[in-house]
Image: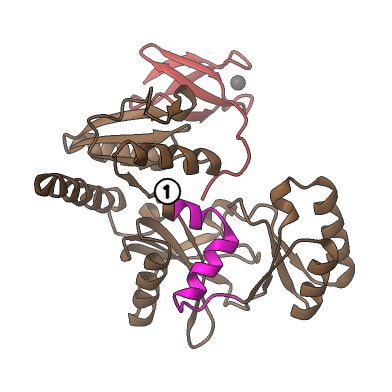
Chain colours: A red, B brown
Amino acid sequence: MTEAECAECGATLDLADDLETGEIIDCGTCGAELEVIDVNPPVLERAPELEEDWGE
Amino acid sequence: MQIGILYSRIRKDEKLLLSELRERGHDVTKIDVRKHQFGLDGTTAPVDDLDVVVDRCLATSRSLYATRFIESYGVPVVNSSETAEICADKAKNSLALAEAGVRTPETKVAFTKESAMEAIEAFGYPCVLKPVVGSWGRLMAKIDSRSAAEAILEHKATLGHYEHKVFYVQEFVEKPGRDIRVLATDGEPVAAMTRSSEHWLTNAAKGGETEEFELDDEALELVKKASDAVGGGLLGVDLMETGDSYTVHEVNHTVEFKALNEATEVDVPAVVVDWLESKATEKTAAEAVV
Ligand SMILES: [Zn+2]
């Protein structure tokens, strides 16, 4: 378990060990979608809005 | 093998795939499409030594262009740009299924509000209006009356992206509260589940209940034909039961497998990686011949 700070509200997030660059995680405190920019150490940024047609 | 994953977001599905690939000792190159350029004679993306690239782009435009460019560099991509092009567009999808003799809901495409209204009236109520692009059941409308049809067409005409100026009207299929999702590799089923919901949209992404489903011979044949119709690949085939038979609604090319992995006994990422390995072997064999 590793920790990082929410880029939106500053809450501390517990992160899984198998974190991947590009992964999207939700902040449990403010609900913001965060993108993992770096894993070692973990860096989170607010995830960009999904653009246009996405999904399957 | 050397495998590339084309992405702009890593979801649970991609994580499952990545961990299975790494567990088997494959060399995985993650390619964030947002960070690269794709030129006529090459790309900044590290694709040169890859045996196969798996397209996991969520945005259809990225998927369509990036796969096309990567193929032009001689690197095989799954799913192919040809498959992506058919699957990304509901109208092309319907045409491909119909041309292959796969039963699919009756569908009409119209380009103006007036003409769409005529199509809707001809189907009668309820019927369904969908955008030709997009997914997860977003912006799909079940139309119950003429006044609802008028309102929706007006909204689409006023607010719509140009792709929403193509009106895709479809018969409403009465189904037993559930539909069937089959994940298949070149027409070979990996796993299948039903998605049930009180709501007419039963997508797992919309919170429908899922349960494993056993395919009968007819369904097996339909999945194969539907997959061939769009050029094969790693696909999600959506079937609905129509009493004594099935109808194929659509084939999805950027398929999610997290829900299937949870709903069934099948180790979905393992079977997908088996298939990817066979794809890489095909490529190596083809090179040996040259
Ligand atoms: Zn937060």
> How many numbered marks does the figure carry?
1
Furthest residue to the right? B147
Q: Does the magenta portion include B93?
A: yes
Residue B68: x and y in percent read: 42, 42
Queried whether the magenta region covers residue B288, the answer comes back as no
Residue B172 falls in which quadrant of the image?
Answer: bottom right
Query: Looking at the picture, does residue B283 appear above or below residue B113?
Result: above
* Magenta residue span: B83-105
Given residues B214 and B37, the one toward you in this image is B37
Q: Is residue B255 visible?
A: no
Could you classify mark 1 by the number of other residues whose Cα lies within 10 Å: few (under 14), some (14-19), or many (20 or more)? many
- What kind of secondary structure does the magenta stretch mostly adopt? helix
Q: Position of residue B109 (x, y in %)?
A: 69, 66
Q: Residue at x 83, y 52 (%)?
A: B157
Along the viewing direction, whichever of B194 and A51 lies nearer the viewer: A51
Residue B111's place in the image compared with B159, above or below, is below
Residue B100: x percent and y percent? Answer: 44, 75
> Which quadrant of the render holds ligand 1?
top right
Label 1: which secondary element? helix
Disc 1 residue type (three-letter): Ser
- Is residue B263 toward the left or the right of residue B149 in the image? left
Position of B136 relative to B120 (above/below): above
In the rendered structure, the residue with mark 1 lies on which chain?
B
